[in-house]
Image (cartoon, grey):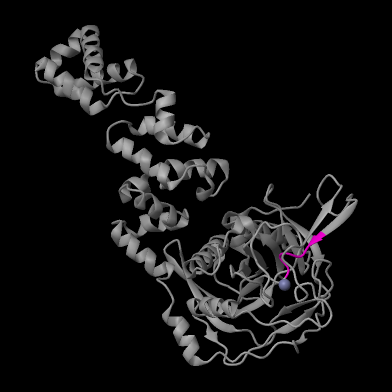
Amino acid sequence: MTKLNDYDKAVETYEPVLGLETHIELDTNTKMFCGCSTAFGAEPNTQTCPVCLALPGALPVANRAAIEATIKIGLALNCHIAEWTRFARKNYFYPDMPKNFQTSQYEEPLCENGYVDVVVDGKEYRVEIERVHLEEDTGKTLHVGGATGRIHGATESLVDYNRAGIPLVEIVTKPVPGTGALAPEVAKAYTAELRDIVRSLGVSDVRMEQGSLRCDVNLSLNLPGEEWGTRTETKNVNSLRSVERAVRYEVRRQSALLDAGERIFQETRHFQETTGETRAGRSKEEATDYRYFPEPDLAVMEPSREWVEELRATLPELPRKRRERLQAEWSLGDKEMQSVVNADAVDLIQATVDAGTTPSGAVKWWLGELSRRANESGEELAALAITPKQVAELQGMVDDGRLNDKLARQVIDGVLAGEGDPADVAAKRGLEVVSDTGALEAAVEEAIAANPAVADKIRGGTHAAAGVLIGAVMKATKGQADAGTVRQIILDKLS
Ligand SMILES: [Zn+2]
């Protein structure tokens, strides 16, 4: 049983130092060093050639679109773009890597020394970027014949090289000290900002759940005033929420070990999505010697300053600017906008507004009822089974008086359960507001007959007493009447 400290206690004693390494798959049409297609989901090993299968004598040629995309990422992250840069071979053996080395970059990355600013709890944190470099992805191994899909118990292992050679950009931060108790939130905010920046550039679909953005989380703890501690690296954390959880878990785990006088091992750990734990993987106590050396088959790159400036001129509106613009368009206060950002709801609300509803209507549902449900089920907001278009339709029905908020929440139940669009759900479940005045008048008559004393009070001018009758009508119509309309009918009848 892993001993864990209480999180708040742990950060009272120790200072966390974060580090984040992110891999982003670029969505170029062709691979990094050959003309093979990068389309997803093709039959295994149909998108390969002598270069990406590493047949003897095959020669790679670098993909210009991938280099441009990486320079754009570097510029958007405020990096210096190298005047002289080259690829290097990173040597290690892995069955899904046909060359037995990965073409990567070592001492001369394409982009260096940038930063990303994120705001957490009203405070700005600068996350410094050490490097942004370009490399290639590996293939995929599939272990079959066993129960778990892992190599243990499998009868055979199959390799698919379609992914081998797809361009990958690696973005490495410098160590991030000074976040204190907010380390998990800063890690999450940085990852979200990086994702949004890259998405705005249109160079990757950056979908964490599909692996086109993969995050490794480094964390160490130290006592105030002492040297930084030994760090662990938690691999392939696949959602924003998991980034936050992985940091939190490592703080709790490492602090318990340190309290007990034990040492932290420098190791690779794996995040367990189901339990929120990290588990020990490969130990890094003996640093792997990758025997990096410059790639002799590829020319060095010398991006001209004119080219870099041309690319800079193509940069779109970046997320921070866009958020400032939307905040003004949506008339939100700083705090409210921060809640929208924290809930990862900017794109969802924008899409809902685009689908025809007001900003306040869109914000109300995404930050209220839908956030509550996402929290309950432990899902990301965007993963809920309701689309911005459906939310716009729902709010439209509220605006038209066909639904009140209470009924709308029941309609959400139906939409999330896969029963169709809001109008279908409302019709099938019989949830629309009773707008038939005849039926409402009859219900009001009944309420008056059942409460003669209250009716007399209203006749006498005490309009506040109408609440009792409204309540009775609501009860009789199972909440499906519009309270404003009912009140009007009551007052018309009794004055
Ligand atoms: Zn190829």
- Above/below status of 351 relative to 75: above
Residue 214 belongs to magenta span: no
Q: Quadrant of ligand 1?
A: bottom right
Q: Quadrant of residue 169?
A: bottom right
Residue found at x 53% / y 60%: 185
Res. 192 in view: yes
Is 257 on the left-hand or right-hand side of 119?
right
What is the chief secondary structure element of the magenta stretch?
A: loop
Q: Position of residue 68 (x, y in %)?
A: 54, 79
- Above/below status of 109 relative to 268: below
Is 65 on the left-hand or right-hand side of 148?
left
Is 428 on the left-hand or right-hand side of 356?
right
Region of the chain picked out in magenta, as a range: 159-164
Residue found at x 17% / y 19%: 490
Between 58 and 451, the one nearer to me in the picture? 58
For the C terminus, which image quadrant? top left
Residue 162 belongs to magenta span: yes
Between 221 and 219, the one nearer to me in the picture? 219
Q: Position of residue 352 (x, y in %)?
A: 38, 49
- Above/below status of 87 relative to 189: below
- Above/below status of 311 relative to 489: below
Q: Position of residue 190 (x, y in %)?
A: 53, 66
Res. 9 in view: no
> Total of numbered circles in the picture?
0
Between 12 and 398, the one nearer to me in the picture? 398
